Image (tube, rainbow, N blue to C red):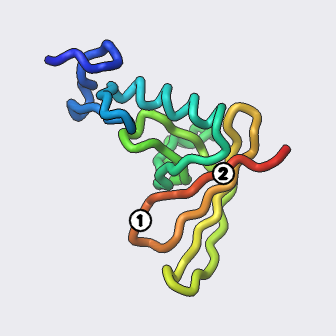
Amino acid sequence: MDILDCGHPESEHNRGYGIDLNGKKHCYDCCAKADRERMRTDDNIDLYLVDAKHESPMKTGSPFWTHELTNWPGSLSIQVRRIKTGHHNIAGKRYDVWFTFEGHEWHGVQYGDNTQICHCRKLKQ
């Protein structure tokens, strides 16, 4: 297994790596670290809005589905606090999501059902 530019071997889960804007290869854990750092310093980021299965907090044994935002390899996961479905004149549907990351409020928008890309921006405090 090759050592990547981040100093780690390829991620064992689905064997792979991410490539940054400079062409450097990073393991999935380092991709998550870079995305977290970007969210700390920048006001926007594109993530993926996905359905996620979680264990019931009431310990009933029945799982429930909710939405979360992830990075490309899925090594970063942020639970969505609220989701609203609306209409869009071209894409048909528009999904607005709100979430908190490290004490900051964020808002994201996904256009249509043929993508998972969610354009997220930090809200003013």
Measuring from the top left, give residue 58's x and y in whole percent: 63, 40
Residue at 85% x, 44% y is 125
Residue at 51% x, 43% y is 54
- The answer to whether residue 49 of the structure is visible from this angle is yes
What residue is shown with label 1? 115
Image-based side of 99 in relation to 28, left or right? right
Labels 1 and 2 touching (C-beta < 8 A): no
SS assignment at label 2: strand
Between disc 1 and disc 2, the foreground one is: 2
Front one among 113 and 43: 43
Residue at 50% x, 55% y is 49
What residue is shown with label 2? 121
- Direction right: furthest residue: 125
* Amino acid type shown at disc 1: Thr
- Direction bottom: furthest residue: 89
* Amino acid type shown at disc 2: Arg
Mark 1 vs 2, N-terminal side: 1
